[in-house]
Every structure is written in structure tokens, then in C-alpha cells.
Image: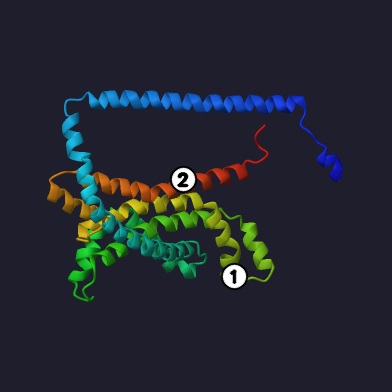
């Protein structure tokens, strides 16, 4: 059997097919590069030919200002990263609790289901900016809490809003698990909590991973809104540098840093989505 396998060689027809696919791939790459270059040149000509092109270039794309503002904006981005880290942990914990509460069955759990549904309805309906103002200025105004950094209240606001969205994603994943999975787990002697933890949640998370990663990308952008509370993050640092240089280039620097922060997650999301689609469709393409 081993010798037969080692002596196997692709047929002439298979080699011809491989060569054809290789030529088609090369042709597609060349056409893509050519069309991209043409579109880029056309856009450059159109934008450069506008009356205010030089003024916009000076106000938004000044290299000297970008170099001078970069250290301060980068230091502010470090605050955004810290907020993102703690907010992501808080969102996952709160969202799982909400999702589980909304999927509980039985009349005795109606109050939990009602409260979880009300929570998700309210915080999915209120804009994040308003929640930031209410939490960042309203809660400290009660005088019940010690003086906290604005980044702390910004993190709380982001957790409140995004946990509502992520909870619905988790709930969709939980409900997508076939009921036979629960029945089989209970037949094996697992109680409700063990079934949820060992059988349902692992499958639910796998089903909704692309959606969760998209929400994480969105949250990476929205952490920049904590600047409205006075936290000196990348956006606030860019605002300070803009006032200093009287030039908008620091905002462009902050935007590019946020793109660099989100790009790996975006590409990872695309890869995971493509991998899951290929796994589900294996054998279905003729």
C-alpha cells in the first residue's frame, strides 16, 4: 500500500488542469493590480484637481505636524488600549449573564427574563454618547462614589452599552444550538448548569464568533468617545495638538492609529468567517 502511494503520479490531464488554474490565478492577480492602479490614478487626478486640494493637504496632511504630534497621540492611544482591555472583559461577563437570563424557561424566571430584556432594549436604543454623559457626569454627581478617573466612567458606559449588543449575539447562538443537544446532555446525567456550561455555551460561542469579533472591532473605535469625559486618550490628545499647531493633521494621525489597532482584528474576523464557511460548505461545491 505504501509503495503504491509513493509511486502515484498525477495524470497528464490533472497537470494540465493545475497549469490552467495557475495561469488563471496569475491573470486574475495582474488584472486586479492593473484595475486598482487605474482607479487610484483617476482618484488622485480628480482630488488633486479640486480647487481646495492644496488647502486640505496643508490642513490635514502636514508631515511635520504629524511627526510632532505622534508621540502625544500614541501615548493617548495607550489609554484607549487599557480601556478596551477592561471593557472587553466586562462586556463578555455581563453579556453572558444577560443571555443566559433571557434563555431561562419557566414562569419563576419571568422577572429575570423581563429585566434582561428591558436592559438590552434600553441600552441598544440609547446612543453611546448619551450614556457616556449620563454615566460620566450623572453618577459622580450623586456623591455616592469617590472621585474616579474619567476613563473609569467611560469604561463603565462602554460595558453597559456593548453588553446589550453582545448579549443578543450570545442569545442567538444559544438558541441556535439544537434542543437534542440539551436532551442528550440531560440524559447523560448533567444538570442544567453543567449542560449550559459544557454543551450549549461552547457550541453557541463557536456559531457566533464572527459576529462577536465584529462587535469587538466596533468597540475598538468607540473607546475613542471617552474623550468627551475629559480623558486624555488618542482623540483628546489629537484635539490638544490640533489647538497647539492650528492644524487638523493630529486627527488624521489618531485615525491612522485606530485603523492600525483594528486592522489585525478585521483580518482575523475575515479569516475566521471564511474558515467557518469553508468548513460548513465542504463537499457542497460541485
Indicate the position of residue 152 as horizontal and vertical percent values. 28, 67
Indicate the position of residue 116 as horizontal and vertical percent values. 40, 63
Q: Which mark is residue 267?
A: 2
Q: CA distance from mark 2 to mark 1?
A: 34 Å
Marks 2 and 1, the one that precedes in the sequence: 1
Q: Nearer the viewer, mark 2 or mark 1?
A: 2
| Residue 129 visible in the picture | no
Taking depth in this image into account, of 4 and 81 the one nearest to the observer is: 4
Check the image and tell me how it is coloured.
rainbow
Q: Quadrant of the C terminus?
A: top right
Taking depth in this image into account, of 189 and 213 the one nearest to the observer is: 213
- Against 31, is 162 above or below? below
Taking depth in this image into account, of 91 and 231 the one nearest to the observer is: 231
Residue placed under numbered mark 1 in the picture: 194
At label 2, counting other C-alpha atoms closer than 10 Å, the crowd grade (few under 14, some 14-19, many 20 or more) is few
For the point 23% across and 55% down, the residue is: 72
Amino acid at each position: 500500500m505504501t509503495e503504491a502511494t509513493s509511486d502515484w503520479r498525477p495524470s497528464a490531464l490533472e497537470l494540465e488542469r493545475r497549469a490552467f488554474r495557475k495561469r488563471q490565478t496569475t491573470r486574475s492577480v495582474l488584472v486586479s493590480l492593473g484595475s486598482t492602479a487605474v482607479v487610484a490614478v483617476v482618484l488622485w487626478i480628480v482630488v488633486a484637481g479640486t480647487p481646495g486640494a492644496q488647502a486640505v493637504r496643508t490642513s490635514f496632511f502636514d508631515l511635520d505636524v504629524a511627526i510632532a504630534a505622534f508621540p502625544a497621540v500614541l501615548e493617548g492611544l495607550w489609554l484607549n488600549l487599557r480601556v478596551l482591555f477592561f471593557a472587553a472583559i466586562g462586556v463578555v461577563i455581563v453579556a453572558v449573564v444577560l443571555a443566559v437570563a433571557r434563555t431561562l424557561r419557566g414562569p419563576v424566571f419571568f422577572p429575570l427574563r423581563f429585566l434582561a430584556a428591558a436592559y438590552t432594549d434600553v441600552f441598544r436604543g440609547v446612543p453611546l454618547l448619551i450614556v457616556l454623559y449620563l454615566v460620566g457626569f450623572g453618577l459622580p454627581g450623586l456623591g455616592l462614589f469617590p472621585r474616579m478617573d474619567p476613563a473609569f466612567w467611560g469604561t463603565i458606559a462602554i460595558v453597559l452599552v456593548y453588553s446589550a449588543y453582545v448579549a443578543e449575539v450570545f442569545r442567538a447562538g444559544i438558541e441556535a444550538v439544537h434542543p437534542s443537544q440539551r436532551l442528550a446532555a440531560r440524559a447523560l446525567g448533567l444538570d442544567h448548569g453543567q449542560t449550559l456550561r459544557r454543551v450549549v455555551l461552547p457550541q453557541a460561542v463557536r456559531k457566533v464568533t464572527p459576529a462577536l469579533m465584529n462587535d469587538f472591532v466596533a468597540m475598538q473605535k468607540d473607546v475613542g468617545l471617552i474623550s468627551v469625559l475629559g480623558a486624555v486618550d488618542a482623540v483628546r490628545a489629537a484635539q490638544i495638538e490640533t489647538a497647539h499647531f492650528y492644524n487638523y493633521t493630529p486627527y488624521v494621525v489618531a485615525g491612522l492609529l485606530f485603523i492600525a489597532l483594528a486592522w489585525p482584528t478585521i483580518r482575523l474576523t475575515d479569516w475566521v468567517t471564511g474558515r467557518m464557511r469553508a468548513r460548513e460548505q465542504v463537499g457542497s461545491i460541485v
